[in-house]
Image (spheres, grey):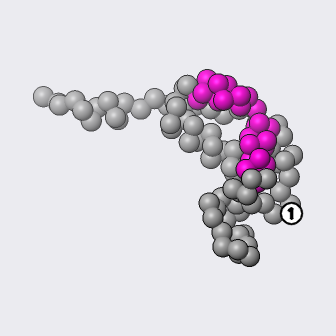
Amino acid sequence: MFAKTRRAEGEKAGPEHHVTGRELLESVCDLARREFGLMAPVVFDLWGVRKTDDFGEIVFGMIDAGILFKTDADRKDDFNDVFALGPALTDNYLISTDDADRGRSVR
């Protein structure tokens, strides 16, 4: 998949912009964990995203709309049952107190 917002007419996205379905899924999960914490599975569920296959539908809809681009090797099947989405969002989640400690004065 290629994540370019615009491309000049006739311009082809180079291989340096390519990510696999698994890489995209792992990145989406990392971002969701940072943004939503342990609520990430709830947020995804509210969006109707319950399995990795759902991201395949989203990505290929964006490809059809010209927002993302694909290579001949990219398939919607690349997203089928890659891993269990819920555990990927919550397993080994660490709650950091770094942000909470910044606002506190130590005496």
Residue 45 in sight in this render: yes
Say which quarter of the image contains residue 87.
top right
| Amino acid type, callout 1 | Asp
* Magenta-span inclusion, residue 29: no
30 vs 44: above or below:
below
Extreme residue in the bottom direction: 10
Say which quarter of the image contains residue 46.
top right
Q: Residue at x 28, y 32 (%)?
A: 101
Choose between 35 and 26: the one closer to the eye.
Answer: 35
* Position of residue 39 in the picture relative to residue 100 (left or right): right
Q: Residue at x 86, y 63 (%)?
A: 72
Q: Position of residue 31 (x, y in %)?
A: 56, 42
The magenta stretch spans which residues?
40-63
Q: Which residue is drawn at 55% across and 25% down?
A: 39
Q: Residue at x 71, y 31 (%)?
A: 49
Q: Position of residue 45 (x, y in %)?
A: 67, 25
Which part of the image, by quadrant, shows the C terminus?
top left
Choose between 73 and 59: the one closer to the eye.
Answer: 59
Label 1, secondary structure: give it. loop
* Magenta-span inclusion, residue 54: yes
Q: Looking at the magenta stretch, what is its main secondary structure?
A: helix
Q: Where is residue 88 in the image (x, y as percent from the top left)?
A: 66, 34
Circle 1 packing at 10 Å, graded few (<14), some (14-19), many (20+), is few
Choose between 27 and 8: the one closer to the eye.
Answer: 8
Q: Name the residue that disc number 1 marks.
A: 72
Extreme residue in the left direction: 107
Residue 41 in sight in this render: no
* Position of residue 39 in the picture relative to residue 63 (left or right): left
